């Protein structure tokens, strides 16, 4: 997205700037217990760069920007932190880093109720300084995708009968996203519904390395190697989403995943885990199913129900598409986010 940002305004990549490199060096010193140099050369360099500029507002699109927020703090602008992380993510990226961000933030934007609840319960942030603004996508671009054509293309590419069922998932291949759970789900569905050929596609993540090799090892041992496919990161993954009968989100933690909105925009019912993030807030009782956390068999049974009941699947898919267009289009939720930003500027 860098070219897009550069078309709108001057862009500085902090991690590649001298100030950013000095901050990285300081973090190494701290981790190793070494004595830090006197003064704050990173701040001096930053202030020399911005001079006496006065910012109307700092909008931080993650909780991990503490090093930048520390440098802007002396200029005393109002700060909005848009929180796309839940507790595993916050602790994984560094609780100390988050605590600095928290202290320097005036208002938080949570991408789901689950994210807001985590901020309140685990980090003692008051609800009156947290706005909920659900994630959003440009839904109109999905209207241009021919679902039938996409399915035909995928079936031909992978030599799959068009009468087969296709179940899709997407994400990196790290532990949090649950690619290992996807393999378990595929095995469970195959065992429950042996009479119907079912193919499973995971889109995204690396196509090599230890994590990927571990997944391939499990797939080969399962005996379903031909039916479980891990497709590395794609520039246009939406053809796979369009070809699928349904979309499963097997993440152990996911604040409000965009891939679910993208699949829903293509009319696919969504399955997810309860207590794993914000997606049950979207799915509700009419756009798919939420099952107990890590209950693979419960999710497998719901997959089977949808495959065996195409009318129910189509109905839930239509409702998922309706919800995305009504609540999660960039023209709707993006405009709401802009209003939150403008309100904070007026207060400042």
Image (cartoon, helix red, strand yellow):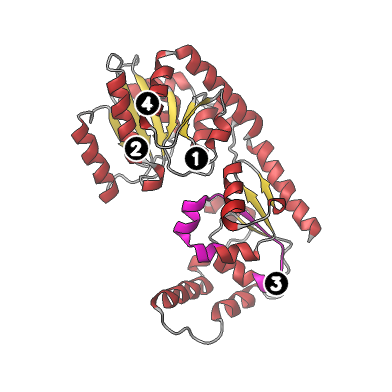
- Give residue 194's position: percent from left, percent from top: 27, 17
Q: Which residue is drawn at 58% across and 57% down?
A: 123
SS under mark 4:
helix
Say which residue label 2 marks: 181
Identify the residue at image location x=26%, y=50%: 210
Q: How far apart are marks 4 and 2 (CA)?
A: 11 Å
The mark that comes first in sequence, 1 or 2, is: 2
Locate the C terminus and report the quarter of the image it occupies: bottom right
Report the front residue among 307 and 59.
Answer: 307
Q: Give the range drawn in magenta.
A: 73-98
Position of 243 relative to 21 (above/below): above
The mark lying in front, picked from 1 and 2, is 1
Q: Which of 110 and 237 is in front in this view?
A: 110
Q: Name the residue under label 3.
A: 75
Q: In this view, does 305 lie above or below 279?
A: above
Which residue lies under the disc numbered 1? 275
Q: Which of marks 1 and 3 is nearer the N terminus?
A: 3
Labels 1 and 2 touching (C-beta < 8 A): no
Nearer to the camera, 190 or 3:
190
Secondary structure of the residue carrying tag 2 is helix
**How many C-alpha atoms fall within 10 Å of the one at disc 3: few (<14), some, or many (≥20)?**
some
Q: How far apart are marks 3 and 4 (CA)?
A: 54 Å
First in sequence, mark 3 or 4: give its number.
Answer: 3
Q: Which of marks 4 and 2 is nearer the N terminus?
A: 2
């Amino acid at each position: 997205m860098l070219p897009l940002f550069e078309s709108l305004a001057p862009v500085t990549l902090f991690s590649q700037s001298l100030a950013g490199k000095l901050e990285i060096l300081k973090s190494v010193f701290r981790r190793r217990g070494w004595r830090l140099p006197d003064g704050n050369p990173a701040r001096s360099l930053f202030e020399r760069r911005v001079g006496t500029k006065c910012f109307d507002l700092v909008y931080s699109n993650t909780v991990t920007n503490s090093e930048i927020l520390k440098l802007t703090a002396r200029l005393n602008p109002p700060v909005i932190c848009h929180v796309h992380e839940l507790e595993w993510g916050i602790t994984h990226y560094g609780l100390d880093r988050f605590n600095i961000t928290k202290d320097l933030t005036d208002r938080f934007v949570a991408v789901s109720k689950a994210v807001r609840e985590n901020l309140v319960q685990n980090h003692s942030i008051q609800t009156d300084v947290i706005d909920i603004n659900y994630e959003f996508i440009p839904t109109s671009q999905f209207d241009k995708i021919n679902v039938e054509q996409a399915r035909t293309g995928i079936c031909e590419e992978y030599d799959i009968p068009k009468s087969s069922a296709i179940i899709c998932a997407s994400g990196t291949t790290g532990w949090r996203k649950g690619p290992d759970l996807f393999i378990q789900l595929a095995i469970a569905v195959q065992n429950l519904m042996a009479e119907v050929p079912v193919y499973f596609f995971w889109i995204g993540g690396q196509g090599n390395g230890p994590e990927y090799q571990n997944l391939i090892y499990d797939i080969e041992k399962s005996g379903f190697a031909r039916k479980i496919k891990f497709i590395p990161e794609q520039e246009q993954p939406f053809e796979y989403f369009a070809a699928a009968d349904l979309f499963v989100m097997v993440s152990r933690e996911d604040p409000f995943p965009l891939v679910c909105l993208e699949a829903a925009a293509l009319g696919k019912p969504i399955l997810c885990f309860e207590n794993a993030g914000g997606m049950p807030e979207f799915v509700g009782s009419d756009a798919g199913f939420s099952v107990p956390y890590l209950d693979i068999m419960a999710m497998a049974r719901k997959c089977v129900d949808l495959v065996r009941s195409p009318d129910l699947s189509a109905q839930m898919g239509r409702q998922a598409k309706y919800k995305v267009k009504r609540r999660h289009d960039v023209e709707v939720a993006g405009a709401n986010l802009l209003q939150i930003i403008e309100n904070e500027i007026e207060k400042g």
